Amino acid sequence: MECLGTFLKSRRDRVTPAEIGLPTYGTPRRVPGLRREELAQLAGVSVGYYTRLEQGQAGSVSGQVLDALARVLRLDQVETAHLHNLARQSVRRGLSEPPREEPHPRVMKLLESLGEATPAVVLGRRGDVLAWNRTGHALVAEHLPFEAPRNPPDRPSIPRMFFLDPHTRAMYRNWPALAEIHVAYLRLTAGRYPTDARLAGLIGELLMNSPHFGAMWATGDVSDCTTGTMLLRHPTVGAVSVDYQVWLQPDSPDHRVEIYTPNDRASADALRLLNQQSGRGDEPESTTVRTGPKPSAERTGCACSGYAPHG
C-alpha cells in the first residue's frame, strides 16, 4: 500500500519551478521538480514539518495543510481526495480480512433491465467480476467459464487478468492506455481502503509478477475510472471499438456496473453477433445473469479477460 510521503514526493517531482513562477537563476538542481523547502514555503508550512510529512513522522495532518499542498502541487479533485485518504491512513495500523463481496439485489435488477443486447459487467472493490450478462461475458472474457463469478474464491480478477494474462494483453489494441487507467484507479482504491488485506495482497502480487504494473505504479498517478474507450482485437468477431461507462451505486460506491456501447456500425454488428452466439439471445435476464450466492435481504453491501482467481 502507498504512504502519504511517497505520494507527496511523486507529485512534488512532477511540478517544475517554472510552472509556478519560481525563478531558478540558472543554478543546477538535484531534483526533477520542486525542492522540499520551495513546496513548504508556498504551502505556508515549515520545512521541518513538511520533511516530517514525507518521512511519515508528522502524525495527523489538518485538512487546511493538505489543501494548501494540493493547491501548490496542482492536484485535481481525485488526486486531492486521494491525498486526504492517505493522510487518514497514516494514523491507522494493521490489515484486516474484508467481508465477502456480493452485489446488492438492486444492482442485479439494473443488470437485468439492460437485457442481453447491451454488454455489462458488475465489478467489486478490487476489480473482481461479481456478475455479468452473457454478451458482457462474450465481449471481455469469452474464453472463461460463464459461471466463474458464482464462486467467490474463483472469481475473475480484472487487475490480475489485465497484467498477468497474455491473452488479455493481446486482445486490447490500446492496452497501454487502459493499463495506466487500471493502475491509477487501483491506487485510488488503495487510499480509500488502507486496511483491506486482500487489496494489499493483490497489489503486492502484481508488483512481484508484472514489471509493467510496477513501472506504472511507480509513477504515483491516481485517477477515477468513469468513462473511456476500449479497442479490442476480439478472437471471435475481430476489431471492436466500444465506449465504457461506469455506473456507481450511491449507497455502495465499491460496486460498479460497467456498460459497453459500440462506437461504429461494424462494432454494433459485432456486438449483435456476440449476443446471438451467446446462446440465449434476448431471453429474460433471470436465466442469463450469473453471480455469487443470492444475498440475504438484510445485506446492504450496496477492463478485462483472462482467468485469474481472486485468491
Image (tube, helix red, strand yellow):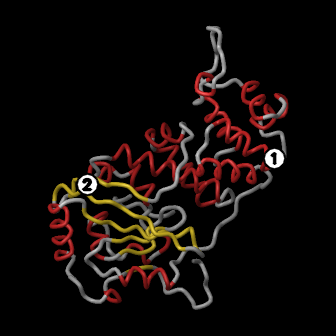
Which amino acid, by three-letter code, is at mark 2? Leu
Task: Report the number of numbered marks.
Answer: 2
Report whether 265 appears left or right of 220.
Answer: left
Question: Nearest the camera: 258 or 15?
Answer: 15
Image location of residue 177, percent across then percent down: 38, 45
Residue shown at 72% from the left, 29% from the top: 39
Name the element at disc 2.
strand
Image location of residue 80, percent across then percent down: 64, 48
Name the element at disc 1.
loop
Residue that numbered label 1 is attached to: 61
Residue shown at 78% from the left, 38% from the top: 53
Image location of residue 43, percent across then percent down: 76, 35
Which mark is nearer the camera, 2 or 1?
A: 1
Separation (CA) of disc 2 from disc 1:
44 Å
Which amino acid, by three-letter code, is at mark 1? Val
Report whether 221 appears left or right of 114.
Answer: right
Res 154 seen here: no
Structural crowding at the residue carrying mark 2, measured as other residues with C-alpha within 10 Å and reported as few (<14), some (14–19) or many (≥20): many
Report whether 183 appears left or right of 287.
Answer: right
Q: Which mark is residue 232?
A: 2
Q: Are marks 2 and 1 in contact (CB under 8 Å)?
A: no
Residue shown at 43% from the left, 40% from the top: 212
Q: Is residue 260 above or below residue 110?
A: above
Question: Nearest the camera: 26 or 101?
Answer: 26
Structural crowding at the residue carrying mark 1, measured as other residues with C-alpha within 10 Å and reported as few (<14), some (14–19) or many (≥20): some
Q: Which mark is residue 179?
A: none
